Amino acid sequence: MTKQAPSVDAWLAEAKASDAADQCGMFLVHNGVVRVTPKQQVREGVEGLGEVAQIEFSYDAAGVDAAIADALTWPGVYYVKVWLNEGVLNVGDSIMYVLIGADIRPNCIDALQKLVGKIKNDLVVEKEIYA
């Protein structure tokens, strides 16, 4: 791993101490991790690719900042924090952490799914390196 992963406990403490905390009835955390199974195999059923040993990972920092700002305009969302790793990552390394604080469960779940999807689909580059 090329960057030190954040402490989820520290993130939650920070979120609960924020000015927005009294609006949040739920916090959800996503921790994306490098897995051994290739993305094409999991998502498309493509077999015979081998096992993933590492990934090369990079992201559009300005795009992530814009996505965070956008997420804060979604219904019921009051708190957002994102951390992305970078460089060559090994199986088991954290790729990203995303924390969403929202008023109610449906808004929190929807926002987490939408923001992680935006980041993964539009703002990162992942190249799998096979064993």
Image (cartoon, rainbow, N blue to C red):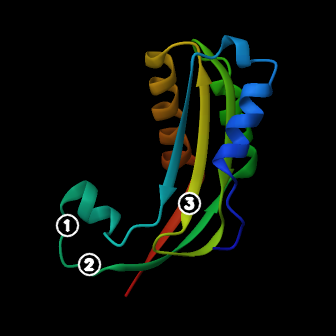
Q: Which residue is mark 1?
A: 46
> For residue 40, which quarter of the picture?
bottom left
Q: Position of residue 49 (x, y in %)?
A: 26, 78
Above or below residue 18? Residue 8 is: below
Mark sitting earlier along the chain (2/3): 2
CB under 8 Å between discs 2 and 1: yes
In what quadrant of the picture does the C terminus appear? bottom left
Q: Residue at 56% x, 45% y: name it.
A: 119
Q: Amino acid at mark 3?
A: Ile
Dot 3 falls on a residue whose secondary structure is: strand
> For residue 68, which quarter of the picture?
top right
Q: Position of residue 50 (x, y in %)?
A: 27, 81
Q: Position of residue 98 (x, y in %)?
A: 59, 42
Q: Which residue is mark 2?
A: 49
Side of 11 where 27 appears, left or right: left
Query: Which of the two marks, 1 or 3, is nearer to us in this view?
Result: 3
Q: Residue at 74% x, 40% y: name it.
A: 65
Above or below residue 56? Residue 66 is: above
Q: Give the spatial CA distance, label 2 vs label 3.
A: 21 Å
Side of 124 where 37 appears, left or right: left
Residue 80 seen in render: yes
Toward the viewer: 120 or 31?
Answer: 31
Q: What's the mark number on residue 95?
A: 3
Q: Give the spatial CA distance, label 2 vs label 1.
A: 7 Å
CB under 8 Å between discs 2 and 3: no
In what quadrant of the picture does the N terminus appear? bottom right
